Image (cartoon, rainbow, N blue to C red):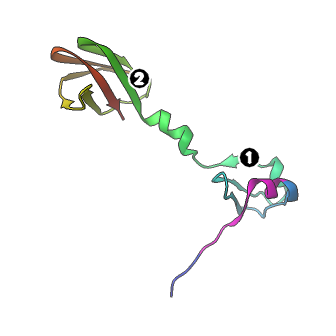
Amino acid sequence: MAVQIQLRNDIAANWTSVNPTLAQGEIGLEIDTNKMKIGTGYAVWEDLSYTGIDSAELLPLVSFNHTQGSDSATWAISHNLGFYPSVTVFLTSGDVVEGSLTHTDINTVSIEFSTAISGTAYLS
């Protein structure tokens, strides 16, 4: 037998207009914004903070794109990701190219190529 779990849900405007008090630990989902709040048993909807991870906010933290507009044999990239990312480089033609990668620190990487090139580096 399959078990189905359904969260209390509605659109944001209805949550705001009704302003219910969610039970302690009860999850309320805004189906039009994909945001959620967790009840305390005493606070009304408007007094609760949103919880969870907003993927729109997460994406900039886990990836970075660097466009090298002019040909250069060395690309110095400050990405500020806070970790040592993997790097893929594409020429402006769309071909993948490899270079010698050096992570200067957790927020900076340098790529050296055998010849001066331009293109885009995708870091994640």
Q: Amino acid at mark 2?
A: His
* 22 displayed left or right of 67: right
For the C terminus, the quadrant is: top left
Q: Secondary structure at mark 2?
A: loop
The question of residue 26 being in magenta is answered with no
- Indicate left or right for 108 with 51 as reference: left
* Mark in front: 1 vs 2: 2
Up-down relation of residue 60 to residue 99 (above or below) = below
Question: Position of 23 compared to 50: left or right?
Answer: right
Q: Quadrant of residue 8?
A: bottom right
Badge 1 marks a residue whose secondary structure is loop
The residue drawn where x is 43% and y is 28% is 81
What residue does disc 2 label?
79
The span shown in magenta is 5-16
Q: Which residue is mark 1?
A: 49
Q: Quadrant of residue 23?
A: bottom right
Give above or below for 116 relative to 92: above
